[in-house]
Amino acid sequence: MLFDLDKQPKRRFFYELYLIAVIAMPMMISQLAQVGTGFVDTLMSGWAGKEDLAAVGLGSGIFVTILITLFGIPTALNPILSQSFGAKRFDVMRREAQQGFFLCAIVGIVGIVILWLLCIPLQNILKWSDYAIKTTVWYLYAIATGLPAAILHRAFQSYAAALGRTMPVMWIGVIGLILNIPLNYILINGLYGLPRMGGAGCGAASAIVFWFNTICLYLYFIKNKYFRQFELNRDWSLPSWQDIAPILRLGLPICFSFFLEVSLFTFITMLIANSGVQFVAAQQIVMTIGSVLYMLPQSLGASISARIGQSLGAKQRKRAYYISGVCIVAGAIGAAFAGIALAILRVPLVSLFTSDSEIILIGANLLLFSAIYQVVDATQTIASGALRGYRITVIPMLIHMVSFWILGLGLGYILAFWIGWGLYGFWCALVISLTVASLALTGYLIYIARKKITHHFV
């Protein structure tokens, strides 16, 4: 049945919101659990000491930069698999998924090499104590071993979202988060005969959890009755360039977009690293809190990508357009409440991580900037996800390039070091850059969605 926008618009709005939530809410909880490992790492390393907190802060920032950049490849699977699922081409979908998983495994191995190589110049750049430098490097060595699992896990998430069943992703993610807590405690403190690793133990614990989540989710796919009907484990073939090329064409611009966004924070951390560990520690705390709140728009972005892909596969172009509006409105409302909560609770939130008064003051000030940009950040994230559903990634990449690096990093550098605002100059530029990205991406989404309807092409 084709979608009729003219009948009962209020009921249609909440119906579409429900269908989006069915995919988005379990994914959000799963991603909260995944981010929760970073939250727990930051929290527990802060208890170990200021130097451990700074080391984990910088190390996790570098790791997350590489990880999220490479997430562009498994993210590209979402609209590809969703359109095949919507068109009921299940054999095609199975082959696309298998080839995508092969590609993600290769990308994960490349990621390990990149992270290990980065440890060499890092030791020469940092002007910290020997203990802090050593902890940072060993954190990266350890957590890098979990990178292939983390990327495959994101590919499995895309597969589950395309099929409209994300609940198992949620439960496995929650179990992994619970497992991360005792593992952190054991490895940080060197219990049961293991060496005391300090903050570096957080990296090893996270790597173990990444592999646990990935293996469990794959076993669920091949054992569960619903997923078994799509025969994911049948007729595996060697990687084929013909099948991998479309994933790369869609995924590489997403990789670059992700890199532009996440590297902005990482480069800010590196630029202010020698200003003192208190600035690095405060920014890491704020980024950890922000990453938790970011899971709502990110999950909505992944969900809308799947729903638009399914709608386009079923030739329901008006429905795809309507879904975009529903998701952006819902995300903006949720982000507004999140921003208000951040502004009110900024001091208690930072105090959860540290008792250092200087870090608390800096972190509380930064959370005000984070509260201001919540709505525009949510809007640009959801609009990007919607455009991925339309298989459009190049123009969003260019928008992110201008917004994040020219305005975010470039303007931020001027405000921080030329004007003299320091770290706060970078965060002021963040507000401006995210606002520009939000307006540009939303406008481009409206143009594309209307064009799809008018010209009747997918």
Image (cartoon, grey):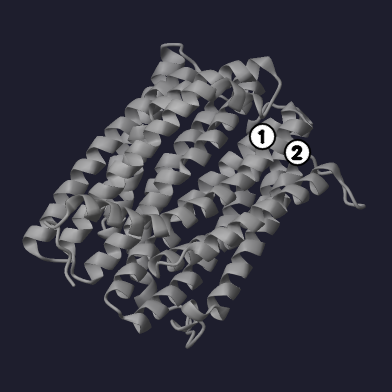
76 is higher (above) or lower (below) than 270 = below
Q: Which residue appears farthest toward the right when viewing the image? A: 193
> Residue under circle 2?
134
- Sequence order check: which comes first, mark 1 or mark 2? 1
Marker disc for residue 124: 1
Question: Is 109 situated left or right of 56 in this image?
Answer: left
Q: Which residue appears farthest toward the left when viewing the image? A: 454
Query: Dot 2: what SS?
Result: helix
Residue drawn 39% across the image and 19% down it: 414
Q: Amino acid at mark 1?
A: Asn
Front in this rendered view, residue 26 or 254:
26
337 is higher (above) or lower (below) than 167 = above
Residue drawn 29% across the image and 37% down it: 438
Question: Is 80 situated left or right of 286 in this image?
Answer: left
Q: Which quarter of the rendering shows the N terminus?
A: bottom left
Q: Nearer the viewer, mark 1 or mark 2?
A: 2
- Position of residue 328 measured from the top left corner of the image (x, y, whole percent): 29, 44
